Amino acid sequence: MHRTLRTLCFLGLGLLAGNALAARAAQEEKIAAAIEVMQQAVRLPEQNIPPRLLHNAQGIAIIPGVIKAGFMVGGSYGKGLLLVRDEHGQWAPPLFIALAAGSFGWQIGAQSTDVVLVFKGRRGVEGIVRGTFTLGADAAIAAGPVGRRGEAATDAELKAEILSYSRSRGLFAGISLEGSNMAIDHEANEVYYGKVVWPADILAGKAGTPASAQALIEAVRKATNRE
């Protein structure tokens, strides 16, 4: 009887350890995907996110592989990362986030897409760090300009605190995400950083900076240092 209980305990511990490793691997894959998105964001300046907008960004959210549910109607959901500049203008360790969006009406037939949000000021970033955040309600958002249009933004784009982009088939395009919800993914942060940690502590560097997080920071730094 005791031997059976010990066996079951060992099996349970092994299962938990395996689940933890799988969850951590999923976060590493998400970071790798986010790095690839940022590298693509500046690879074709004429067709991607204008360098000047990235250069002046106070925060950047990268949500790779947002999944579209339904055809023309329904919603979309994805998990990604948020990077924020600190008081010295340097990029802090990333926060894991979740995005729940309305239907991507213009992308009929698309099953998944990469989403990038460029935060022009601190208000939107600070709102997300505090908790659930509704794009368009808590901060103005607009579909971002692409390529040379970044030098001649529309009135809506100039007033918006957040500019949103979608990447499909390797190219970026502005997309409306008004009414979408964004929230901190506390569970993913706990798995990745190895402990229960508050968003403010992650941004302050108190949770450490794993190697993959440092690689993402470097990719964002390179993308935002171009004009």
Image: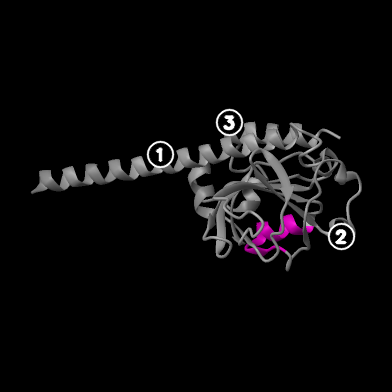
Alpha carbon distance from label 1 to label 3:
16 Å
- 132 falls in the magenta region: yes
Q: How many marks?
A: 3
Image quadrant holding the C terminus, namely top right
Residue under the image location 78 percent in, 51 percent down: 144
Up the image or down, 27 lies above or below 71; here it is above
Q: Which residues are magenta?
A: 123-135
> Could you tell whether 98 is left or right of 25 in the image?
right
Residue under label 2, please give it: 159
**Image x and y of residue 73, in percent:** 57, 65
Label 1 secondary element: helix
Question: Which residue is pictured at 63% across the width and 49% down the height?
Answer: 201
Q: Amino acid at mark 2?
A: Lys
Q: Position of residue 28 (x, y in %)?
A: 52, 37
Question: Which of 134 and 15 lies nearest the eye of the viewer?
Answer: 134
- Residue 185 visible in the picture: no
Per the model, the C-alpha gap separating discs 1 and 2 is 44 Å
Q: Is residue 98 magenta?
A: no
Instruction: Give the mark nearest the N terminus, 1 or 3.
Output: 1
Q: Residue furthest front?
A: 109
Considering only order in the chain, which callout, 2 or 1, is on the residue closer to the N terminus? 1
Q: Which residue is mark 3?
A: 211
- At horizontal 66% and vertical 61% (from top left) the residue drawn is 130
Q: Nearer the viewer, residue 68 or 142?
A: 68
Residue marked by disc 1:
21
- The residue under label 1 is which amino acid type? Leu
Picture quadrant where residue 51 is located? top right
- Label 3 packing within 10 angstroms: few (<14), some (14-19), many (20+): few
For the residues carrying marks 1 and 2, which lies nearer the camera in this image? 2
* Disc marking residue 57: none
